Amino acid sequence: MGFYFVQFLTGLASASALFLVASGLSIIFGVTRIVNFAHGAFYMLGAYIAFTLTERLSGAFGFWGGILIAALAVAVIGVIVEMLLLRRIYSSPELFQLLATFGLTLMVEDLVVLIWGPDDLLGRRAPGFRGAVEMFGQNVPSYDLFMIVLGPVVLGILWLLFHRTRWGILVRAATQDRDMVAALGVNQKWLFTSVFGAGVFLAALGGALQIPRDAVHHALDLRIIVEVFVVVVIGGLGSITGAFVAAVLVAELNAFGILILPKVSIVLVFLVMAVVLIVRPYGLFGKPEAVARKTPGLSVRPWAPFTRNERIACLVGVALAALLPLVAGNYALTVGAEIAIFVIFAASLHFLMSVGGLASFGHAAYFGLGAYGVAFLAKLAGLPMILCLALGPLLGLAGAAIFGFFAVQLSGVYFAMLTLAFAQIVWSIAFQWVPVTGGDNGILGIWPEQWAAGPARFYWLSLGIAVAVVSILRIIVFSPFGYALRGTRDSLLRSESIGIDAKRIQWTAFVIAGTAAGIGGSLFAYLKGSVFPDNIGIGLSVDALVMVLLGGVETVSGAVIGAIVFKALSIWLVSQTDWSKLILGGVIVLIVVAFPKGIVGMIETWRHSWRARSDAPSAKPAGLAASQPEGAE
């Protein structure tokens, strides 16, 4: 009994730290509507700066002074980021804001390694809380008791701040209806800045307070951000009380899941998140938005059919790509095959987002399922490669069919978060079902057969399948189904009023996109010769979003160009510098700020602008018309 009580207290201590970070993210999203992927990076910065202040400058500030100053310093950094970067893109689609904060995350990951090194850092114990208290025959760290008390105290302070101050009332009002707050004359610019600074302060404080309990390392950001998203969604976006209750729920599930259900402990949290979103889409304490919002990042302008020149350009591009083995070596061909595979992956998500209006945060699930489908058929059933490539993607299709049925019942960020929950469930199963999936060791030895074994042959295979998949997706876009799907994107009520079964159409689109992603995953398994749970991880899903947004979600060829540029740049930077994430993140941020329509969107804008100038009649001097004969031009 005593052991379980101590485990319960350990869960409460973790819940307090999780609540600090989650409350900050909930406040930021509730007011600014920014899906702040960099929130985990601010948490990590708080831990690193607190370590420096408490270890190397402890004489100047003391432990607790160092903790507080670290959180304030990161809050100042957050305010600067908001003023210099996010303030410029508040009018941009929300998914572009996600892309910008993802670029910031990449930059911070390399910066902390550059400043503090790659090794884990162990902080000192907190003064006055270095011992333990005996309870029911078990020792409970006194610092855990401090954290248990701190959580409700911070909750109380935040409640008073948001219910007893004018600033707090404005923040709560903006959480419900930003447009109405603006109509009342409130300066949204400074309200957003103050909210962002407060949210970053809470994240950094949570990170700083963790140094006596956990090692500080450069992977803290991705580890915490997934749990924080889960907490915020379960509790309800914009609800501080919901964030506290959800943090306790998630922390206790983590604490007891490993004891009671060790085989499914990682899955439990995401199962709860999925159930909450299905039963109550706005979270336990959340409320529906005052105005329904479309999925961000989409344009009502449909994809236009290829012009004659564009068809010629595509054929020339494919022909040049097919000739690559005549001039390139094996390494370049392997990279080319990988780029072709990710073109398939990005195109599948682009189809879902651009035409269907459905932004998936967990699209890697179907890519990974396709890879595991090939692995099972090749290693367990011993089927030939051609059958594995044909049947492997069916596992991605099955996953998309099951998960898509529930996901399409939601919209906007709730749809995105449910897809993330499903993807993490699949990842958890792959990670923990060791007898079947190999767990973290993966499934090895999945090599192409002789007819596709050479780099040139596999490259041609990947290129041919990529061209076929992209072409088929384009044909679907201009089919009657594609126009019906576009109708559900632009106006759900109007499409249903003319007899379109919107949910069925969206579910079918989800299945098509999942199947296409599974085809890419099947090829990827043969390219790498192995399959690991990372093929389903959140990092790969974010990569797909980056490819689509980088190329241009509103454009015809955005996914193709975005995948080529992102993968080629990523691979090249890794081979050229140790600071590849820093440079890649900077490039992403630059493109979001300077070219929010993406690379292809930027090129199209320039082309239309040049064409408009060329077609405009030239201005004539003032007296020229009078001196010309009648009828002269």
Image (cartoon, helix red, strand yellow):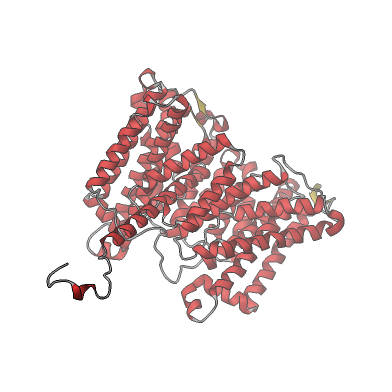
Q: Is residue 395 visible?
A: no
Q: How many marks?
A: 0
List x then y, in percent, for residue 94: 46, 60
For the point 60% across and 65% down, the residue is 196
* Residue 453 visible to an observer of this rendering: yes
Name of the residue lying farthest toward the front = 627
Q: In the picture shown, does residue 325 fall above or below 201?
A: above
Q: Is residue 387 left or right of residue 210?
A: left
Give the image location of residue 628, x and y in percent.
Answer: 17, 71
- The residue positioned 53% from the left and 41% from the top of the image is 428
* Residue in front for this viewpoint, 54 or 366: 54
Q: Please tell me whether residue 95 is drawn above or below residue 119 in the rendered image.
A: below
Image quadrant assignment for residue 61 = bottom right
Q: Name which residue lies at 29% across and 54% down.
A: 485
| Along the viewing direction, whichever of 268 and 231 lies nearer the viewer | 231
Q: Quadrant of the C terminus?
A: bottom left
Q: Position of residue 141 (x, y in %)?
A: 79, 50
Q: Position of residue 522 (x, y in %)?
A: 40, 32
